[in-house]
Amino acid sequence: MVRRRSSRNKVQQFYCPYCEGRMWRAGSQKHFLFYLGASEIQRNVGISRKSAVMLAAKGDYVDSKSWIEDFFCTKHGKLWMKITKRAQENLVASLATREDWQQTTHTIQPDILNSSVSEFTYRMSRRNGTKYYEQYSN
Ligand SMILES: [Zn+2]
């Protein structure tokens, strides 16, 4: 990951992980990551156990600083990148993994996972989240 890129350059540029050519944002919807339970929150957000437990008590935690977004490389076509927002508005991009997609199931399929779905069914759908990955990776 490139750190310390000139902060004078307001429009951040992204580069393809395969060919290192410039990638362009496709401008699609951002698929935010979210976490279930204190352990997931603590691991992904990097906060204290106590804070994670407090956040978990309020329900699912949506990470407003991590999302999957659609990019385009002129050589490699469409690429789904996981974007993580760091300090100073710096965005770090890495290829979205299957695990990343499973973290976003909630935001990809908001109409299915409504409040009438039991916690059990909801968790099961998270475990079986691979179908969303396949659907969105083409
Ligand atoms: Zn490329």
Image (cartoon, rainbow, N blue to C red):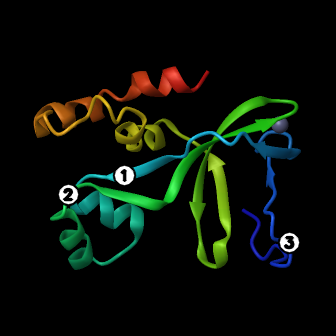
Q: Classify mark 1: residues with Cα within 10 Å, few (<14), some (14-19) or many (20+).
A: many
Instruction: Give the percent coordinates (x, y) of residue 91.
Output: 66, 63
Gap between marks 2 and 1 measured at Cα: 10 Å
Asked if 127 appears above or below 57 in the picture, the reply is: above
Question: Quadrant of residue 78 in the image?
Answer: top right
The residue pinned by badge 1 equals 34
Gap between marks 2 and 3 measured at Cα: 38 Å
Gap between marks 1 and 3 measured at Cα: 30 Å
Asked if 5 appears above or below 73 in the picture, the reply is: below
User: Does dot 2 land on a helix, a strand or a loop?
Assistant: loop
Instruction: Give the percent coordinates (x, y) of residue 1.
Output: 72, 62
The residue pinned by badge 3 equals 9
Q: Earlier in the sequence, mark 2 or mark 3?
A: 3
**Residue at 20% from the left image edge and 35% from the top image edge:** 122
User: Does dot 3 land on a helix, a strand or a loop?
Assistant: loop
Question: Quadrant of residue 55 in the image?
Answer: bottom left
Circle 1: residue type: Phe
The residue pinned by badge 2 equals 59
Q: Earlier in the sequence, mark 2 or mark 1?
A: 1
